[in-house]
């Protein structure tokens, strides 16, 4: 299944954004989905994950500010981001977690992602 993130933009510090991730097929068979981000000049990092039964996990840096959700009927995953900070700036992606095939170890494509820029 291919996943494409959208909904990024430029926002002031303290503002909010809601990112969406659309899947090309059913996400029912994908147990755990995740949002990731790559800050400028840094490595990609996991931001939040959600399992098929709704269990969530977050990076310490976003706990209490971000909320991940999924809609299996719409084959979509969302990331509500509140209280945004300049350090949240980066390109955001969605992908299964972990981001590789468990049988072949082949990495999943990351797609173009969506740019989030938080101004101070």
Image: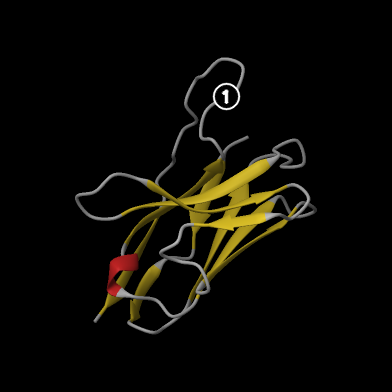
Q: Is residue 8 above or below residue 17?
A: above
- Residue furthest to the top: 104
* Residue situated in front as seen by the camera: 114 or 67: 67
Q: Residue at x 48, y 78 (%)?
A: 82
Image coordinates of residue 104 in percent, x first then y, are: 56, 15
Q: Which residue is mark 1?
A: 101
Q: Residue at x 48, y 65 (%)?
A: 7
Q: Is residue 37 above or below residue 61?
A: above
Image coordinates of residue 59 in percent, x first then y, are: 47, 57
How many marks are shown on the rendered structure? Answer: 1
Q: In the figure, residue 101 lies in which quadrant?
A: top right
- In-image side of 107 versus 2 (left or right): left
Q: Is residue 34 above or below residue 16?
A: above
Mark 1 neighbour density, 10 Å: few (under 14) some (14–19) many (20 or more): few
- In-image side of 2 versus 14 (left or right): right
Q: Quadrant of the C terminus?
A: bottom left
Image coordinates of residue 38 in percent, x first then y, are: 33, 51
Q: Residue at x 61, y 17 (%)?
A: 103
């Amino acid at each position: 299944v291919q996943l494409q993130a959208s909904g990024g933009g430029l926002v002031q510090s303290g503002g909010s954004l809601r990112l969406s991730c659309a899947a090309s097929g059913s996400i029912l068979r994908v147990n755990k989905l995740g949002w990731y981000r790559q800050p400028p000049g840094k490595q990609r990092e996991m931001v939040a994950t959600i399992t098929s039964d709704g269990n969530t996990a977050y990076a310490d840096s976003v706990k209490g500010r971000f909320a991940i959700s999924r809609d299996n009927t719409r084959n979509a995953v969302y990331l509500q981001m509140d209280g945004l900070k300049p350090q949240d700036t980066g390109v955001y992606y969605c992908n299964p977690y972990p981001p590789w095939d468990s049988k072949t170890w082949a990495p999943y494509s990351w797609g173009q992602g969506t740019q989030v820029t938080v101004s101070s």
